[in-house]
Image (cartoon, rainbow, N blue to C red):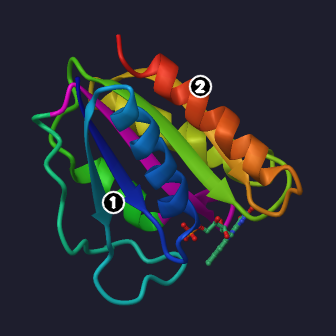
Amino acid sequence: MDIGIVVHSQTGHTHSVAEKLREKLATAGHTVTLERLEAEGEVRPGVKDVRLKSVPNVEAYDAIVFGSPVHGFALALAMQAYLRQVPSLAGKRAACFVTQSFPFAWMGGDRALRQMTRACQAKGATICGVGVVNWSRRSREQQIAAMVDRLSRHLPS
Ligand SMILES: Cc1cc2nc3c(=O)[nH]c(=O)nc-3n(C[C@H](O)[C@H](O)[C@H](O)COP(=O)(O)O)c2cc1C
């Protein structure tokens, strides 16, 4: 299966989780491409017209994972901008995950995930898994391992 991982990450947390997922999926025999989503210039809260350095083309993938940090109790603006621009996800399976610093998903993670899954569904994707990583938790590494394991099992059809 051809799987794309599109990840936005400012300080590296989300990217490191995406790398673990990439390794797991590759070990399971999938062809995996990790694409990094970057905004042009500084992104300030409330900015409406976030410009992206590039818009990863996900047409070739059977399934796609989207990963993003939580910013201001919401999905990071760069990922919001990307999911608005991505042409179509019709017929594709998608998994979404976010990382956040606060210890509980209700402190922004759940909301960001809702924004992400709704945006994917609006473009025609079928959501097959979601996850939140709470970076300040002591059990973070276990949380990451469990999420990577769960998503890698649910992603392929
Ligand atoms: C501008 C900004 C706003 C943030 N807002 C939240 C928030 O609302 N809730 C939360 O738990 N963490 C928040 N964080 C922390 C990040 O979500 C967290 O550190 C995340 O893991 C960073 O991912 P990254 O290293 O991939 O960029 C915020 C960070 C920044 C820079």
Residue 38's disc is none
Q: Give SS at disc 1.
A: helix
The image position of residue 71, as x and y in percent, is 61, 67
Viewer-side residue, 53 vs 119: 53
The residue located at (28%, 82%) in the rendering is 40
The image position of residue 130, as x and y in percent, is 57, 32
Viewer-side residue, 35 vs 74: 35
Q: Give SS at disc 2.
A: helix
Locate residue 108 relative to residue 120 in the image: left or right.
right
Nearer the N terminus, badge 2 or badge 1? 1
The amino acid type found where label 2 is placed reads Arg
The image position of residue 110, as x and y in percent, is 69, 42
Return the residue found at the far right. 138
Look at mark 2 in the image and give the residue it sits on. Answer: 150
The residue located at (36%, 17%) in the rendering is 156
Q: How crowded is mark 1: few (under 14 residues within 10 Å), some or many (20 or more)?
A: some
Quadrant location of residue 55? bottom left
3 in magenta? no
Look at mark 1 in the image and give the residue it sits on. Answer: 81
Which residues lie in the magenta part? 61-76
| Mark closer to the observer (2, 1) | 2
Viewer-side residue, 31 vs 73: 31
Q: Is residue 139 above or below residue 157?
A: below
Q: Main secondary structure of the magenta part?
A: strand
The image position of residue 154, as x and y in percent, is 48, 18
Please tell me in which quarter of the rendered image ligand 1 is found: bottom right
The residue located at (47%, 68%) in the rendering is 9
Locate residue 31 relative to residue 68 in the image: left or right.
left
Q: How far apart are marks 2 and 1 (CA)?
A: 27 Å
